[in-house]
Amino acid sequence: MRMETDRYLTFALTKGRLAEQTLKLLGKVGIECREMQDKATRKLIFVNEELKLRLFLAKGPDVPTYVEYGAADIGVAGKDTILEENRNVYEVLDLGIGKCRMCVCGPASARERLLHHERIRVASKYPNIAKDYFYNKKDQTADIIKLNGSVELGPLVGLSDVIVDIVETGGTLKENGLEVLEVICPLSARMIVNPVSLRMETERIKGLIMRLRGNLA
Ligand code: PRP
């Protein structure tokens, strides 16, 4: 009979801002690979043979994709990405790191347009979140323009009236004469799981969730 731990548990983690805090948190519950400490490495996948773990770092929006297809059993991604990608995965734990908010931002002069539900141009890296907010929650006609970064430029150069974007410290907005006009939702890093993996590896995954829960700030 195949031992339960014969199977590798694969983790897809988000590169960049979230990576360091995620690895620290996972390290606390023993999910780590020695090879990962080498900052200069160009390796993409890290294995812990002893614990039968595999970890890899991917671009945020790809993490729910790896998890939905079962290429990773478990993923860590921002709630923003999870909402935007809307993949078939289970969100099982709020890790309480990378806390920020999804907001409608713009110059103070755009406040009236929002208040009166006038047709509005919205630039965002998150077109699905922006559509859901304006069409379904606010019932406001909006032209959504997809951008890939530095979204604050939108209202500054006249591409859009407002943006839908992440606000953490508020520093970027302030430096560019913009402000939060409406808050859409709070965000943080979440653990997601492939539904089949959760069924096949229930004990291992539930044990991990419990241990992580005990280590959250
Ligand atoms: C994010 C976000 C804002 C900024 C908010 O951008 O899109 O621009 O951080 O943070 P703050 O409130 O602390 O200033 P990121 O740096 O990830 O890069 P991007 O603009 O290229 O998406």
Image: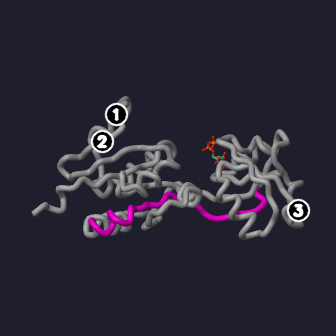
Residue 43's disc is 1
Report the span colored magenta.
180-200
Q: Quadrant of ligand 1?
A: top right
- Which residue is the extreme one toward the left? 1
Residue at 82% across / 62% down in the picture?
141
Identified by mark 2, the residue type is: Phe
Judged from the image, the secondary structure of the residue bearing numbered disc 1 is loop
What quarter of the picture does the C terminus occupy?
A: bottom left
Is label 2 in contact with label 1 (beta carbons under 8 Å)?
Answer: yes
Marks 3 and 2 close (CB-CB < 8 Å): no
- In the image, residue 49 lies at what x, y percent? 19, 46
Alpha carbon separation for disc pair 3 and 2: 51 Å
Residue shown at 81%/52% (left/top)?
121
Q: Which residue is mark 3?
A: 118
Q: Is residue 140 left or right of residue 205?
A: right
Q: With respect to residue 128, does 38 lie above or below?
A: above
Q: Comparing marks 3 and 1, which lies closer to the viewer?
A: 3
Which quadrant of the figure has residue 130? bottom right
Q: Percent x, y for residue 111?
A: 86, 60
Residue receiving disc 2:
46
Q: Which mark is residue 92?
A: none
- Residue drawn at 77 percent across, 69 percent down: 138
Disc 3/disc 1 C-alpha distance (Å)? 50 Å
Location of residue 108 with respect to 159 vertically, above or below: below
Residue 172 appears in which quarter of the rendering?
top right
Q: Is residue 182 magenta?
A: yes
Q: Quadrant of the N terminus?
A: bottom left
